[in-house]
Image (cartoon, grey):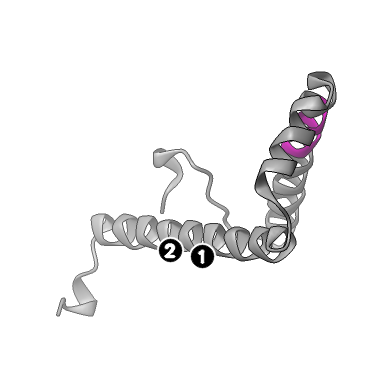
Amino acid sequence: MRDKSKVTTKDVKNDAIKRMILNAVIFLGLMFVTFWFIFKDQDFNDIIKILGQVNPGFIIIGLLCMVGYFSMEAWNINSLLKSFGEKSISLRPSSLP
């Protein structure tokens, strides 16, 4: 067990990386459970067949909208954190505490 009075920057970075990995695993797990509940009674081959008939332009537009939504949501959360004087981290290693 490490001495709490001698916490180094490396320890803080390692803890932040571990938290990010844990959060990513929880997020992916929740995504899996959500998709499982949505598609559990559906035939996967029918879904693939239907997706093959969809205009690819609509799929690209949908994906771009999703990326735009997540980007704007991240920007909004970051703005709120800054307005409350809280520090936020991004995915860049240099921004880890």
Looking at the rendering, in which quadrant would you find the C terminus? bottom left
> In which image quadrant can residue 35 be found?
bottom right
Locate residue 66, reporting x and y percent: 76, 39
Seen at 67% across and 42% down, the residue is 45
At horizontal 23% and vertical 61% (from top left) the residue drawn is: 8
Disc ID at residue 37:
none
Mark 2 surroundings within 10 Å by alpha-carbon count, few (fewer than 14), some (14 through 19), many (20 or more): few
Give amino acid for label 2. Leu
Name the residue beneath numbered marker 1.
26
Query: Which region is colored magenta?
Result: 61-68
Residue under the image location 37 percent in, 55 percent down: 17
Q: Is residue 22 left or right of residue 12?
A: right
Residue 84, horizontal then vertical, whole percent:
71, 63
The crowd level at tag 1 (other Cα within 10 Å; few <14, some 14-19, many 20+) is few
Where is residue 55? Give x, y as percent: 84, 21
Report the predominant secondary structure element of the magenta stretch: helix
Query: Is 11 displayed left or right of 21 in the figure?
Result: left
**Quarter of the image containing the N terminus?**
bottom left
Total of numbered circles in the picture? Answer: 2
Can you identify the residue that label 2 sits on?
22
Q: Please state which amino acid type lies under the numbered disc 1.
A: Ile
Q: Nearer the viewer, residue 66 or 12?
A: 66
Q: Are marks 2 and 1 in contact (CB under 8 Å)?
A: yes
The residue shown at (19%, 71%) is: 6
Establish if 68 lies above or below 35. Answer: above
Taking 42 as reference, is 45 above or below it?
above
